[in-house]
Amino acid sequence: MVMYCILLLAAVLVTVLHPWWLIAPLAFLIGGFCTRSASRAAIIGFAAVFTAWLACACYYSLPNHQLLATRMAGFFLLPNAWTLIITAAIPGALTGGLSAASGVLVRAMFKRNKPV
């Protein structure tokens, strides 16, 4: 839960202020330091970045009554604006999940084995 909250807040700040690809090193570092299981890091990273990108897309889309999102959805032959907004959050979520899992695996690779 702590990793989810940290990554969610950091992802929102990075999404609003910086390029989208900074999600990857951010999730890599937070995943490497906050959890020990790669599968858990992948799920938490996916969920946190998905939530952050979905929130940011809604923040930008709802004030203008989804005018641009509706037009873009029609361009991509999607049924409505919400489908576009959810579809747009998936690449960021995959990036966050895979980066967080990679952070855990890289940390495990450099961890010393205890002597027997």
Image (cartoon, grey):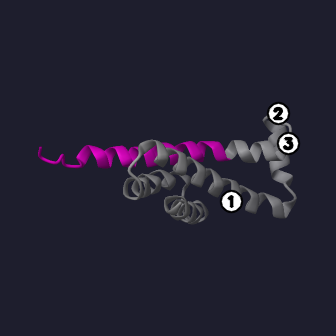
Q: Residue furthest front?
A: 116
- Residue located 49% across and 59% down the image: 3
Q: Residues within 10 Å of mark 2 (few under 14, many from 20)?
A: few
Identify residue type, mark 3. Asn
Residue 2 place in picture, x, y as percent: 50, 63
* Circle nearer the N terminus (3, 1): 1
Question: Looking at the rendering, which quadrant does residue 101 occupy?
Answer: top left
Using the image, tell me which numbered label, if any, was put on residue 80.
3
Identify residue type, mark 2. Leu
Q: Secondary structure at mark 3?
A: loop
* Circle nearer the N terminus (1, 2): 1
Which residue has dot 1 on it?
56
- Residue located 69% across and 54% down the image: 54
Does residue 103 appear to the left or right of 5 in the view shown?
Answer: left
Using the image, tell me which numbered label, if any, was put on residue 77.
2
Residue 65 place in picture, x, y as percent: 87, 58
Residue 39 place in picture, x, y as percent: 46, 42
